[in-house]
Image (tube, helix red, strand yellow):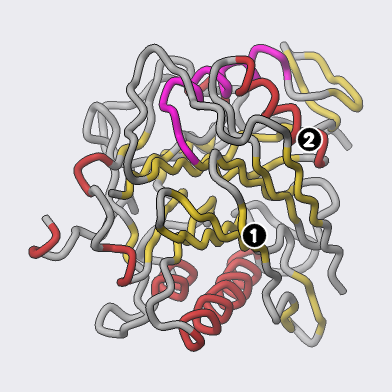
Amino acid sequence: MLAASSCDQKSGTPDWAAPGAQTDAPEPAEAASLEVEADIETPDASEAVTVSSETVSPTGLRFITYNVENWLTMDRYVDRKALKGAPKPESEKQAVVAILSRHAPDVIGLCEIGEASDLAEIQEDLKAAGLNLPHSHYTGGSDPTRHLGLLSRFPITSTAKPAETEYKLAGQTFAINRGILDATIEARGKSYRFLGVHLKSKRDSEQGDQEAIRLNEARLLRRHVNSILKTNADARLVVYGDLNDTRATPAIKTVTGNYNDPTYLTAIPAKDSRHDAWTHHWALHDLYSRIDFIMVTRALRKDVNFPAAKIIDDAEWDKASDHRAVLAVFQ
């Protein structure tokens, strides 16, 4: 069966803010599972990133989370034609690379990557565009098609797997679809532990109720966060990805936790150049919503440059993906 892309009917940035785009404001003082993993490293780890449009800061860290919409081989519709076993169109790939290289991230968390070779292709394309991110990590869950990837300018010092990857629903056992990416990076004398996810979409599933699946996956993520913080209460965690739900929903509340709890995760507020906060356009229903997040633990929140965070709305965003990238800057 052909999978129709949700970006076939994309339009430009709307003039209204999307519902569900609530964000945390910084505190006043701050103003049976299939799991595949691979680490890919290339030489020139110390090579500087060179971009003409934006200066790379010699301190801190720039991080982007981005669902690049099916950077993989699949049956798809392109220019109103059904194609079997086709890669992401070259024009869409070029748009993704242009956006990422223009904003000069030190680390990128990617959703909807196909094989490890697809992640390596993005890495090489970015290098050719002047953004060298020589370190990478690739992982997945029970979904054999879509995976998670992380690219970094700095060395990945360790990776880990969550202790729990399965849940029960309606008497059956299921594995988390896209897994949980867990990679630690040392950058300019500071440690960052990145936890990436791509929770169940709002599309119907043969497994069961899509909302119940997403909530159970969110619980697995929260348990992994809690296990890390139980061992190290000062862990500098960056929890990110396409959570496929908005702030007021049970899934997102499960991930963030209770505000007064020391394990609470702050969702970094971000808006685009027009002060809109949506990150995804679902063309089928013409819905704009904020479903992509970057969250941090209390230990890391003091290093967040809140005014620098933004949703990237470059002109080619809708050619690149049905999502818009989110940028966070750490001091």
Q: Residue at x 71, y 58 (%)?
A: 178
The front one of 263 and 60 is 60
Asked if residue 154 lies left or right of residue 163, the reply is left
Question: As displayed, is residue 51 above or below residue 34?
Answer: above
Magenta region:
89-106
Q: Dot 1 corresponds to which residue?
A: 181
Residue that label 2 marks: 3
Q: Give the mark nearest the N terminus, 1 or 2.
A: 2
Mark 1 closeness class: few <14, some 14–19, many ≥20 residues within 10 Å = many
Q: Which mark is residue 251?
A: none
Give how far across and how far down residue 224 sits, in percent: 58, 77
User: Would you say 167 lies left or right of 57 here?
Assistant: right
Q: Which residue is at 56% across, 17% downward?
A: 95
Residue 159 figure quarter = bottom right
Where is residue 200? Give x, y as percent: 64, 59
Looking at the rendered structure, the kind of residue marked 1 is Leu
Where is residue 9? Give x, y as percent: 56, 22
Q: Residue at horizontal 81%, vertical 41%?
A: 116
Tell me if mark 2 has few (under 14), some (14-19) or many (20+) residues whose alpha carbon lies within 10 angstroms of its own.
few
Q: In the rendered structure, which amino acid carries the disc numbered 2? A: Ala
Given residues 262 and 129, the one toward you in this image is 129
Q: Depth check: give the residue in front, 229 or 287.
A: 229
Tell which tag, 1 or 2, sits nearer the viewer. Answer: 1
Q: Is residue 102 magenta?
A: yes
Quadrant location of the N terminus in the rendered image = top right
Marks 1 & 2, CB-CB < 8 Å contact: no
Q: Indicate the position of residue 26 as horizontal and vertical percent values.
A: 19, 60
Label 2, secondary structure: give it.
loop
Q: Is residue 242 magenta?
A: no
